[in-house]
Image: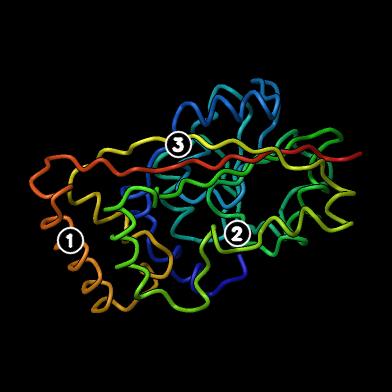
Amino acid sequence: MTNEIAAAGFNASGSRYERGRPDYPTAVVDLLVERLGLTPERRLLDVAAGTGKLTRCFLGRAEVRAVEPAEEMRTEFARIQPGIPILDGTAEALPLPDADVDAITVGTAFHWFDGPAALREFHRVLRPGGALGLVWLQRDEAVPWMRDLLALVDSYRPADARRYAETPWEAAFETAEGRARFTPLEHATIGFTYAVDRATAVQRTATTSFVAAMPEPQRAEVLARVTAFLDSHPDTSGLAEIPLPHQAEVYWCRRVG
């Protein structure tokens, strides 16, 4: 990852990330298994794996290993699923030999990468005909109360803190080099609701990269405002479980050559 905010935030938030981020829906995992051609005999690398939210979904469906640059994330990953190999590395410098894996997945992270450098590395470690799957789990701003909540949190967002929807991450695939290395991206959107208790809903905000990187007094201020919003908004106040509307944006392509 190239952004200092992401590095600081994710290094400080392993346990919060595990609690606050939604699990990947079965429909998303099934789609990736199909489109990437996964089988228990094929070798899968999950890049920027975090605490293993996406990685563990493929257990029994591929031979799985993971790469993650943040030490606290790797520690939490190893605690939760000690049987999966987790390596220290970045998308731009993968600690694997050439042609080592059949597929690569990236969950809610590619927009943080140096896209061209990452694609060069992905092409290097993938076997001929290997597949790449990218997925983002995004809060659904088409739902009015969620849009209002995100506007509140985004009022604290630094200018250089990246959002997936505002980052031209696809440009790396559209250059001459990108087209020479990977087939055109295919895409599907899958909507889902993530129902959680109030404390976990607040923790979802705490896992946002720039919030996780804040000094504690400022982070406490943001989370207090989020709590007050959820307690007072007519769509969320008084609910034992808060349905957080999300969309999964799923992309896939194959290695050329």
Using the rendered view, name the quadrant where residue 157 is placed: bottom left
Q: Earlier in the sequence, mark 2 or mark 3?
A: 3
Task: State yes or no: discs 2 and 3 in contact (Cβ < 8 Å).
Answer: no
Circle nearer the viewer, 2 or 1: 1
Identify residue for label 3. 24
Residue at figure coordinates x 49%, y 79% from the top left: 159
Q: Where does the image place residue 256, in percent across and percent down from the top left? A: 87, 40
In this rendering, the answer to whether 27 lies above or below 156 is: above
Decide which of tag 1 and tag 3 comes sooner along the chain.
Answer: 3
Q: Amino acid at mark 3?
A: Tyr
10 Å crowding of disc 3: few (<14), some (14-19), many (20+): many
Q: Residues within 10 Å of mark 2 (few under 14, many from 20)?
A: some
Position of 96 with respect to 1 (left or right) is right
Disc 3 secondary structure class: loop
Q: Which residue is mark 1?
A: 229
**Quarter of the image with the C terminus in it:** top right
Instruction: Tell me if 35 is positioned left or right of 229 in this view.
Output: right
What residue do we see at 25% from left, 70% from top? 222
Helix, strand or loop at mark 1: helix
Instruction: Check the image and report above or below for 252 versus 171.
Output: above
Residue corresponding to mark 2:
111
Q: Which amino acid type is marked by label 2?
A: His
